[in-house]
Amino acid sequence: MTTATGPLQGVKVVSCSTAQAGTVPYTLMADLGAEVIKIETPGRGDPSRTAGQVEGYPSSYFETNNRGVKSLTLNLKDPRALDILYKLVAEADIFGQNFRPGAAERNGFGYEDLKKINPKLVYASISGYGPDGPHAALPGTDAMGQALGGIAEAFSEPGRPMRTGIVSVADETCAILTFGGILAALTHARTTGVGQKVDTSLLGGQLRLMGWTLTTTMWRGSNPVTGQARMVGTEKRPGMSVCFEDRDGKPFVFQLAGPKWQVAMQALGFHEELEAIGLGDLGPAVVSEDKRNEMLATLDACFARDSRDRWVETLRAADIVAAPINTLLEAVEDPDVLANGYISEIEYPEHGKTAKVHGTPWKFSETPAQIGTAPKLGEHNAELLGRLGYSDKDIEALTADGVI
């Protein structure tokens, strides 16, 4: 019996994608057993191959975003290379690209071009702003997505300059939504025999990421309060997510609804102090900025009396959601992260080391994910072209002519 290598075993993907949002959907598919063929420029490859360098390691950027895929070099300006691409597409389930809108069409691999070759094909196109609108033809980046989509404002602090975050939230959100959209379209194609184009964008992903908070903002017609505390609801039905620091300056967060306020404050030993200033109930802090500031100042002083570990443990014991605010280095050592395999280790023999990498966010009981490494440029040229019927002599000629 053949051992399954993942729930997407048998799925074939061809990707003319670079950067992060354009490649992560397919490396997730590779983790889950799909064969992903990455098309790269001969001699140069994906420009991100040299991004995120750490001494003694491969490119952290390229490795994270392209692990488990196969590299085939094609100069798509040459008709012979375009013919190879068409042959691959004829056998593929999915094709992906993240060129500016219109570029793929001008170069012979737009959706209408490839649909003629394979009517069942799921064609994924990722852009910065979306396929329509006044800025559709502009390039997009993660910072642009965060800025336009609202996340920079949502995580801002009053009185301080806004900024985009260091983690590529727009890229990753778009990639994960693209991953889901592709699989939805693939299900439809396998049921009906009809493929389709799936458009996603950095901007569209950020709007989805804003979730119900965006809905509330639209309905109220005003921006939410940002900063140390996220206050939600009304005076009668209040809620709060809030961050504080302990005596050593270590931050943590807790979140609760109004009925849990007294439970939490009594468990912490703060209830009498808050009641003395009219905050025995959370409601006033939702509707009054002065009361909110008074509450935050009082709790700042209270939490400065002891350690983060004690406060988090006390809140959790009272069934209040609480957690330390981890640095990135703390996050990768978190016991729940390690126990669930969200961080893994993989061998890099040519670098002489075993290195920590992303694990997988899924657990499949029957078809577990398998983590690979990123390919060398053109590593799979001979394998893939041989499978299409090209001889060793053909491959040598194509190499010499700069086609591959």
Image (cartoon, rainbow, N blue to C red):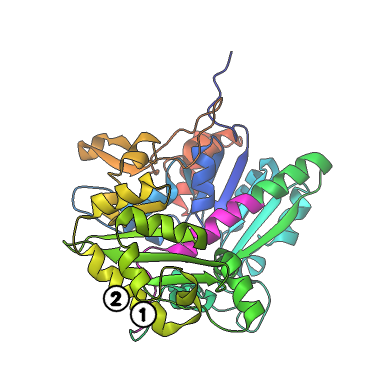
Residue at the image position 42 percent from the left and 36 percent from the top: 371
Q: What residue type is labelled 1?
A: Asn
Name the dominant secondary structure of the magenta segment: helix
User: Which structural element holds mark 2?
Assistant: helix
Q: Which of 185 and 304 is in front in this view?
A: 304
Residue at the image position 55 percent from the left and 64 percent from the top: 209
Q: Where is residue 303 in the image (x, y as percent from the top left)?
A: 25, 63
Horizontal side, residue 65 vs residue 33: left or right: left
Magenta range is 161-181
Horizontal side, residue 158 vs residue 399: left or right: left
Q: Which of 123 and 303 is in front in this view?
A: 303
| Residue on which disc 2 sits | 297
Q: In this view, does 106 lie above or below 369?
A: below
How many C-alpha atoms fall within 10 Å of the one at disc 2: few (<14), some, or many (≥20)? few
Whether tag 1 and tag 2 are in contact, CB under 8 A, the answer is yes
Q: Which amino acid does label 2 sit on?
A: Ala
Q: In this view, does 279 lie above or below 184?
A: below
Residue 300 visible in the displayed image: yes
Q: Nearer the viewer, residue 42 or 146?
A: 146
| Residue on which disc 1 sits | 293
